[in-house]
Image (cartoon, coloured by chain):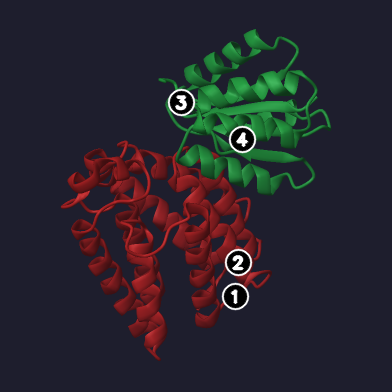
Amino acid sequence: MVGIVLISHSGAVAQSVAGLAKMMAPDARVTFAGGLPDGSFGTSYDALYEAVRQADDGDGAVLLMDMGSAVMTAEMVQEALPQTQLLLADAPFVEGAIAATLTAGFGASAEEVLAAAEAVRGEQKLN
Amino acid sequence: MADSKKVAEVLRKIAQAVEQEKDALTALDRAIGDGDHGINLARGFGAVAARLDEAANASVGAILKMAGMTLVSTVGGASGPLYGTAFLKAGAAVGEKTEMDSNDFIRAFDAAIAGIAMRGKAQQGEKTMLDALIPALNALREDPDFANGLRRAVKAAEAGVEYTKTILATKGRASYLGNRSIGHADPGAASSLLILQVIAQEVLG
C-alpha cells in the first residue's frame, strides 16, 4: 500500500493531521515529521527521512508539506532516496492529506494518490 | 590557496562569527521573517564545527559535503536546505582535492549559488541570499587578481544587502508582508555577507 507522509513546522499539527487522516482510513500507512528534536517549530531532515522510510513498504509514498523549508526538506529527502518512489504533492496540507490517505487506503497507485491530493487544490468550500 | 586544514579552520571561524552575530541576524529575521535565522544558523554551524575533528584528514570536497549535510540535518529552517545545498554543491565542484586554488574556489562559489537558486527556486532581485552572493561572484570574476577580487566581492555583497532593503520580498514568509517588507534587509543576504566576510578575512590574512 502507498504510504502517506506528512511534514509540518509543528509537531502537533503533523501528528494531529495524521490522526485525522487515519480516522478516515484506519488501514492506511501514515507517518509524519513535525517540529525540531527539541520541540521547537521547524522542519527536520532526519525526522522526515525516517518517516519516509517507515511509510514505504515498497509501493512508494506520497508526501504532503506545509510550506517553506518543509518543501525544500522534502525535495532533499526525495533526492537522498532515489530508490524510493516518493511523490511530492502540491496540495493544501490538511485536505490533501485526507484525500491522499483515503485514496491510498483503497489500494490506489502512488500516481493516483498524488492526483487525489492535488485535485483538492481547486475545490471550493463555499458555493 | 587553501588546503583541507585551512578550509576546516575557515568553517570554524564561520561558526564563531555566526554565534557572535546570532542576535543581530535573528533581529533582522524578526522584522520580516519568523525570527529564527540567527538561532538556526548558530545551531547548524556549531554542529559543523563539532564534526570538523572527525574530518581532519578528508579532502576539501568531503569537508564541504560534511558541512552541507550537517547544515541540512541541524538548521531546521529554510536556511538549512539552502546553505546545505550550497555547501554540498561546492564540495562536489571541488571534489577529492586536498588543496583548492582560486579557480576551484570560483567554481565552488558558482556551484553553491546555482544550488541555492535551484533549491529556493529563486533568482536575483527577490530579496534573498542571492542578492548578496551573485554580485559578489561577479566582482570576484571580474578582477584578474584574486585577493583584490575577494575584497571587491565583500563590498559587492555589502551593497547587495543594502539593495535588499529597497526591494519587495517575493520568497518565504516575508512575501506575505508585501510592501511592508521594504526598508528591511534580508536576513539571508546578511548571513551570506557574514560568511563571505569570514572567508575573505581568513584567505587574505
What residue would you read off at disc 1? B99
Q: CA distance from mark 2 to mark 1?
A: 7 Å
Height in image: B99 above or below B17? below
- Tag nearer the camera, 1 or 3: 3
Q: Amino acid at mark 2?
A: Val
Q: Amino acid at mark 3?
A: Gln
Q: Secondary structure at mark 2?
A: helix
- Tag nearer the camera, 1 or 4: 4
Left or right, residue A50 beside residue B144: right
Residue B60, numbered label: 2
Q: Amino acid at mark 1?
A: Glu
| Residue A59 image point, x, y percent | 82, 32
Q: Which chain is green?
A: A
What residue would you read off at disc 4? A46
Q: Secondary structure at mark 1?
A: strand
Question: Callout 1: 10 Å neighbours few (<14), some, many (20+)?
Answer: some
Height in image: B88 above or below B70? below
Mark 2 chain:
B
Left or right, residue B116 beside residue B148: right
Q: Secondary structure at mark 4?
A: helix
Left or right, residue B84 beside residue A24: left
Q: CA distance from mark 3 to mark 2?
A: 53 Å
Q: Amino acid at mark 4?
A: Asp
- Tag nearer the camera, 2 or 4: 4
Q: Secondary structure at mark 3?
A: loop
